[in-house]
Amino acid sequence: VGFDNYVDVFQDELFWQSVWRTASFTVMSVAAIMLIGLSMALLLNEEFRGRRFLSAMLLVPWAIPYVANGLMWKWIYDSGYGALNGMLFQLDFIDKYMVWLGDSEKTLWLIANAFVWKEVPLATILILVGLKSIPADLYGAARVDGADVWARFLHITLPALRPSFMLVLIYEAMMAIRHFDLFFILTEGGPAEASHVLAWHVYVETFRKLSFGTGSALAYIMALVTFVLAFWLIRTLGKKL
């Protein structure tokens, strides 16, 4: 059939909607992972009582398999007995239990929250390794020159973390673009296709509609997009390393 499958894909409005949702999910997830991972790494790089315990606890989300992680968050978000509803109700933030995953405006954010919780530990470890590799003499010299904490962070810490940032960005972006598990367990693309992302679109076309040609075309498109994004990040962040 030549490129007919690709033509059909690009003419499908649902495909472009899934691309937009995938892009939104990737941006919000990776941004949150980077910010939280950097904050946690900066915290764990300091000496304080309980640091070893906190470091050990940080690994717990990373050690949980994705299916178990999805089931756990499905229970947390449950409208009848979920921990999220229970906590907010006890704190008087809500006056009745809410159907969180049934709200099309909140669904993508809630799935992103579960994804971020799982991925933050790895990002923290990678950034923490970068922090440990920064020579202490640089900070000492900066203090002698009168640089405050913010100046040392901007001119020493951030430039030195470029390799770690590049690695985290590439890995987490690839994971977010092709992520499937949480969408399958929590919502199955719903409600009203609010979480119908590209990976779920591939699954629906291939295994539910049994349209293997279209599903393969979608998979190749997703692989190509992932490769181009990774290549662009390496060229952009790696050229000044």
Image (spheres, rainbow, N blue to C red):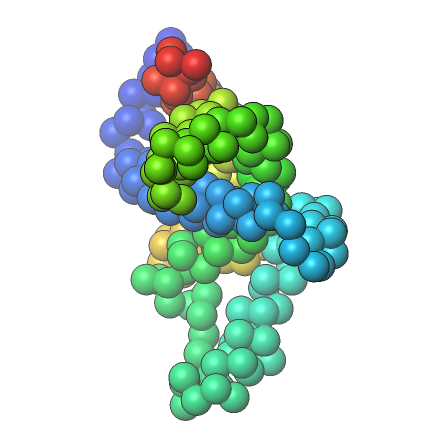
Please state the horizontal and vertical placement of residue 102, each as a whole percent of the image: 42, 68
Q: Is residue 191 above or below residue 140?
A: below
Q: Is residue 142 visible?
A: yes
Q: Is residue 181 visible?
A: no
Q: Is residue 52 above or below residue 148?
A: below
Q: Is residue 91 above or below residue 82?
A: below
Please name the residue shown 53% across and 45% down the image: 42
Q: Is residue 14 above or below residue 7?
A: below
Please name the residue shown 37% across and 67% down the image: 103
Please name the residue shown 59% across and 76% down the image: 83
Q: Nearer the viewer, residue 209 or 234?
A: 234
Q: Nearer the viewer, residue 52 or 227?
A: 52
Please state the horizontal and vertical placement of residue 23, each as a whole percent of the image: 34, 38
What is the quadrant of residue 221 in the picture? Answer: top left
Count of numbered tags? 0
Please state the horizontal and vertical placement of residue 89, each as a whole percent of the image: 48, 86
Please name the residue shown 56% across and 50% down the image: 43
Whether residue 46 sits left or right of residue 96 in the image: it is right
Q: Nearer the viewer, residue 222 or 112?
A: 112
Q: From the image, which quarter does the N terminus lie in?
A: top left
Please state the horizontal and vertical placement of residue 109, each as a whole percent of the image: 40, 57
Whether residue 178 sits left or right of residue 229 in the image: it is right
Q: From the image, which quarter does the C terminus lie in?
A: top left
